[in-house]
Every structure is written in C-alpha cells, then in structure tokens.
C-alpha cells in the first residue's frame, strides 16, 4: 500500500533538498574511478535556535584511499543538533557476508551513486494499492465511518454489510493473482555486495515475549561484527544486558501497556479514563525513539548513532526517525501487519472473508488517526520534518518497508499476495533453557507423577486472580491431571497442593518439554515454544494477536477453539484439557515440532536484514571531538554532574 509519490506531502521538501545537494555535488566532486573512491555522508546542523533539524545539510566527501579499520564510534548525540564531523576513519566489513542486493543505487546528475532511505516509498504496488491511493482524505474518512464498528470493549469490527461505494470498488479487485506491478526504475540487482559492520538500533515496544526474539537476533547480528543496541522498556534492562547486548531505555511501562490492552481489548480506549493512560504511554514511547538512535551509551558514554534501524510496529515513530536520520528501516514482527486476502488483521473482527485485506487498511488508518497529532508534533519539534496529511497512507502502513515475520511457515505459510519485500523467517528462539538449573524440589515433583499440564498467562493482568485460579483447580481435578501454575504478572495461584506446583519464573524452552500440554494466553513467543516442544495447546486470549494464534492452533487441530479469558469456565477448560490429551492431537503436535526443529529463524532473520539493505548505505560520521572522548576520570565527573543536585555554575 502506498502513494505513487506525485502528491506526497514530502515531495516539494525532498526535491528542494535534493536540488541543494546536487548543486553542492556538482561544485565539489570530480570524475574519478569509483573503485578508488568512497562516499562519505557528513551531517551538519543549522545554527537556528528553535527546533533545529538533525540533518539540515548532507554533504558528500570523496576519500582518496580505501579504508580498512572499523568505525566504532559514529557520533555523539547533542540535544537536537549534529555538529560537523571530520573524515571518517575507516570501515571494516563483515567476514564472508555477501548477499544479493535488493535495490539498485540511485545515480544523481553528478554521477555519484547513493541509495534512498528504506523509509522512502518503493515503487512496487499492487492494484488495490493504486486504487486506495486515489481515494481522497474525505473518502478515506468516510470509508472508516461506513465500515468500522467500535465495540463497547474497544475492539474493531469491519462490517461489510453496510453499503460503501469506495469499499465496493476496492473489493472488486480481489482475489489478487499474479505478481505486483513493478516499475522499471526499481528492478532488483543480482550482484553481490559486502555488508559493512553497522551500528544497528532495535526499537521494541511490548512485553518480555515481544522483546525476546529480538534479543536472539541481536546476538546473532553481533556475531557478524555489528554493534547492536536493543532499545526497549527499562523493565528489561537486566534481561538484555545479561545476554551481552547494549541496552537503551524506551518510554512506556509494559505493565501499564498490558493492563490497558487487556481492559480495552483493542485499538480504541473504552472510556475517558483510558484515554489519558493511552496518551501518556504513547507520548513517552515516541519521545524516546530519537535518543535511542543517537545518544551515547548511558553506562559507558561510548557514542552511538544508528546506521540502520530494526523495529516492531508498536514503536510508533520508527519510520519518521529513520527518515530524519536517513538510514534504512526494517520491520520485524510476531503477528501479521501486511495486507492480505488470506486472513484478517489480528486486531480486527471480520466475519466476511472478502473484508480481510480491507481490515488492514482500516486498522492502519485508525492507528494513524489516533497518533497523528503526536507524530506530527514530533516531526516538527524534534525532527524538523514537515507534517503528514491526516489520512496519509504513508504513515499508517508498513507495506512499503522490508518486513520479516517471526513465525514458522509450517504453521502459517507466507500468503501468496505478499511480495518480495516480505519474509516469513521462522521462530526466533533465545534458548534460555540450555543454562537453566531448576530447583531440586521442582525436578522431584515433575518426576514423581504423570507429565503435568502447564497453565500460565505470562504478562497478562487478571481482574480476579482467585476466581481464575479456582476455575483452573476445579478443571484439573475434574480431568484428574497434575498442573503447573505459572503465577506471572497476574498473580495466578494461591497455595501449592499435591497435584499443583506454583511457579514464579522458569524458561519455557526448558519447562514445556516436561509437560503433556499447555494452556496459556496465546502470546506469539509462548505459542512458539509450546509448538516446538510438541505440546497440544489451548489458548485463553486476552487481546491483540492472541485470538489469531488461537485460531491457527484450532485450524491445525493442535488444540481446541480458543477460550477468551472473559468466557473461561470449569466446563470449557475441562473439555479443552480432554481434547488436548487425545493421542491424535499429540501426534499432530509432534509432527509440527519436528518441522520447527529443522528451522533456524534467527539465521533467516539476519539473512533477510542483510538482503534488504540498500546497495549503498548512508553512513554517518564521527563527531569532531572524536579523538577527545572523555577518559575514565573525566567520564566519572561527567556522571557525577548528571546526578548532582546543586548547579555547578561557572566553577
């Protein structure tokens, strides 16, 4: 989905910047053998007092020799401005990491090649994208009003029974068959390239289950020589750092976010009291994205500037930061966010299959509707970028960005209408269980009886933990099964019994192989680990993509139909347990587990990231005082100055 660029609000702005850049290149550059030249990108800030841009000017400098040593410190964040930089020292390359390029470098009038940021619109569009782009803003607004029904709990339902001329015109295009329309100036190159060692910032918003697969990818990227910073909520600082990955805090509290989503079940706040919570969390997240990509390490003071960004969609603002920094952006996610005719958007209820593709468009527009004021304020105040139109498809959608989905293609194959920008890489496991040492009493409890059933809801809050616990205990008693109750953030369980073990924290990849079946909330990571262990699964969804995964489990007959937490009862849970204990269900689960075992989602994710990098990377340079970085003693006093409660004045 995307605009053809002719009426894009950034068009005049980009053309003006490009003209100034081209004049500078024509003046300064000389025609030389490209093999003996390297292009440098130097960022300078304007001297304006108010809200100056990170990149008001971009200057290309040609070096006269090839450079071999790596760039370890790219730049240092200075509130809003970026100061002039000396020539970049050098650039190491990842050993033996050639990949096929997916984009041709652009060549300007001076003969120097460069690539646009990955946030720029790719001219690869499906017929329905072209049709949607021709809708005016008022028509898009009317489309939402006519087709979207907001339920009392905040969920979104797409109702195609209503008469909507715009929707009818769009739906006439489905089903889509054949390849997308590819314009001549975006043909892919089959040439090989060497991937340089990059400074990569990962922007991840969500619970621990959302963060964990990114941590696995970060560790593998580091093996290629990249410096990776994982920016996520402060709650996960120890978790990230203990894995040997740089950490930077993002705004927002995952406990508050999980509670908000559980209460509202969807995109729209269900009451006035929820609106302030949503706004506060959203603003905190957006405001923290730019520092995460540009500020020095908060513990060591080592400068950092992202040369590439990996983000999940809830890190709203990722595309705008990438646009301002001029760096490529790659989306990674655990649930579908790219329009398809094969299944609906996970955050929307769509009773008619004809509306599956349209549900993605409507959810995109609704999200943009809710965050547009924050994003445009952020663009103007922090990034010095022009505002985006109210119903612009440029911001609500990720369809123009390279996207990798982290689930097994054996569970949900890549839809036939997803183009070459989209990869389904497989599950990305961190394998925490390999180093886990369980308590002896827990091991003895497991071994003294039949394999237990795991029941836990992870980070999900429970309105009435006691009631939920009582239902679970009664269902286990009714089915004569032993159970492991994972207390989680919801406080499940109250006291241990002979057939019940209360668990506080244990890696699922160690625990689930000990279990006969699993019952959980349906988080993508928990679902993945259960399937890898060959466990029949019952999903008790709270919100978001959890119902989507429950439906996939049911469709493959790996478990019963999902039971929403609000509908959980002794009878329904007992019937679900009995279904999971059937031998044929266990057999199907083991067959899928063998297929997942042979996948390497982390390797495929890293390959996808490398493959979709532009042929020429816009590499920022170091700050002018690079050679004058603070020594340990100076850094000690800098840290004291940050926390000192008294102003130092001129002393």
Image (spheres, rainbow, N blue to C red):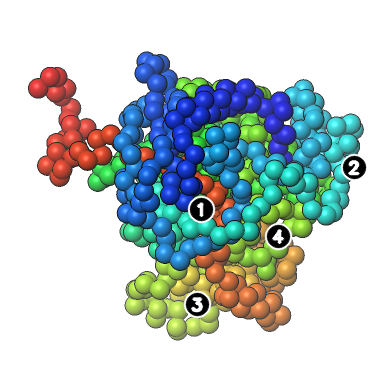
Q: Earlier in the sequence, mark 4 or mark 3?
A: 4
Q: Earlier in the sequence, mark 1 or mark 4?
A: 1
Q: Spatial distance from mark 2 to mark 4, Cα to Cα?
A: 23 Å
Tell me if label 2 and label 1 are in contact, CB under 8 Å. no
Q: Nearer the viewer, mark 4 or mark 3?
A: 4
Residue at horizontal 44 percent and vertical 30 percent from the top: 28
Residue 172 disc label: 2
Residue 514 disc label: 3
Choose between 571 and 401: the one closer to the eye. 401
Q: Spatial distance from mark 1 to mark 3, Cα to Cα?
A: 24 Å
Tell me if label 2 and label 4 are in contact, CB under 8 Å. no
What element does badge 2 sit on? Answer: loop
Q: Spatial distance from mark 1 to mark 4, Cα to Cα?
A: 21 Å
What element does badge 4 sit on? Answer: loop
| Residue 492 showing in the rendered view | no
Q: Nearer the viewer, mark 2 or mark 3?
A: 2
> Residue 651's image quarter?
top left
The residue beneath circle 4 is: 414
Q: Earlier in the sequence, mark 2 or mark 3?
A: 2
Residue at horizontal 34 percent and vertical 55 percent from the top: 68
The residue beneath circle 1 is: 210
| Residue 223 showing in the rendered view | yes
């Amino acid at each position: 989905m995307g605009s053809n660029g002719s009426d894009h609000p950034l068009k005049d702005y980009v053309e003006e910047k490009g003209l100034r850049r081209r004049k500078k290149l024509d003046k300064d550059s000389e025609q030389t053998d490209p093999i003996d030249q390297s292009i440098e990108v130097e960022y300078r800030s304007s001297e304006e007092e108010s809200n100056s841009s990170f990149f008001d000017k971009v200057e290309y400098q040609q070096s006269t020799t090839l450079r071999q040593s790596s760039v370890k410190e790219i730049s240092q964040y200075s509130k809003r401005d970026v100061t002039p930089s000396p020539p970049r020292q050098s650039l190491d390359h990842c050993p033996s990491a050639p990949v096929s390029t997916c984009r041709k470098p652009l060549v300007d009038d001076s003969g120097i090649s460069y690539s646009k940021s990955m946030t720029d619109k790719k001219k690869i569009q499906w017929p329905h994208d072209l049709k949607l782009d021709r809708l005016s803003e008022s028509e898009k607004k009317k489309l939402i009003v006519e087709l979207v029904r907001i339920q009392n709990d905040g969920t979104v339902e797409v109702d195609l029974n209503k008469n909507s001329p715009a929707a009818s015109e769009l739906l006439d295009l489905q089903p889509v068959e054949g390849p997308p329309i590819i314009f001549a100036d975006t043909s892919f190159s089959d040439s090989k390239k060497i991937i340089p060692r990059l400074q990569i910032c990962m922007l991840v918003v969500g619970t621990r289950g959302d963060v964990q697969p990114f941590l696995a990818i970060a560790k593998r990227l580091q093996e290629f020589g990249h410096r990776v910073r994982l920016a996520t909520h402060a709650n996960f600082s120890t978790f990230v750092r203990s894995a040997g990955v740089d950490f930077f805090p993002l705004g927002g509290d995952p406990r508050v976010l999980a509670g908000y989503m559980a209460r509202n079940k969807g995109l729209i706040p269900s009451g006035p009291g929820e609106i302030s919570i949503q706004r506060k969390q959203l603003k905190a997240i957006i405001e923290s994205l730019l520092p995460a990509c540009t500020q020095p390490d908060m513990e060591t003071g080592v400068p950092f500037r992202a040369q590439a960004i990996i983000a999940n969609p809830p890190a709203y603002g990722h595309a705008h930061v990438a646009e301002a920094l001029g760096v490529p952006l790659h989306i990674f996610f655990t649930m579908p966010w790219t329009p398809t005719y094969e299944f609906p958007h996970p955050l929307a209820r769509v009773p008619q299959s004809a509306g599956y593709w349209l549900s993605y468009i409507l959810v995109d527009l609704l999200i943009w509707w809710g965050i547009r004021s924050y994003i445009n304020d952020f663009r103007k105040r922090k990034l010095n970028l022009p505002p985006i139109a109210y119903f612009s498809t440029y911001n609500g959608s990720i369809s123009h960005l390279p996207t990798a989905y982290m689930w097994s293609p054996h569970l949900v194959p890549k839809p036939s209408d997803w183009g070459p920008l989209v990869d389904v890489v497989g599950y990305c496991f961190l394998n925490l269980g390999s180093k886990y040492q369980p308590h002896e009493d827990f091991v003895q409890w497991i071994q003294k009886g039949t394999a237990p059933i795991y029941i836990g809801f992870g980070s999900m809050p429970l309105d009435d933990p006691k009631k939920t616990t009582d239902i679970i205990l009664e269902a286990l008693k009714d089915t004569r099964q032993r159970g492991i109750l994972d207390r989680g953030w919801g406080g499940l369980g109250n006291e241990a019994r002979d057939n019940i073990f209360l668990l506080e924290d244990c890696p699922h990849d160690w625990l689930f192989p000990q279990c006969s079946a699993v019952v959980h909330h349906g988080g993508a990571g928990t679902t993945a680990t259960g399937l890898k262990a060959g466990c029949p699964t019952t999903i008790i969804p709270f919100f978001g993509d959890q119902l989507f995964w429950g439906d996939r489990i049911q469709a493959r007959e790996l478990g019963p139909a999902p039971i929403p937490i609000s509908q959980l009862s002794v009878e329904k849970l007992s019937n679900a347990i009995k279904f999971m204990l059937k031998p044929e269900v266990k057999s199907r689960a083991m067959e899928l587990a063998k297929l997942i075992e042979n996948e390497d989602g982390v390797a495929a994710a890293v390959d996808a990231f490398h493959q979709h990098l532009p042929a020429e990377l816009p590499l920022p340079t170091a700050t002018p005082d690079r050679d004058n970085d603070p020594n340990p003693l100076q850094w000690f006093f800098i840290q004291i100055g940050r926390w000192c409660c008294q102003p130092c004045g001129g002393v």
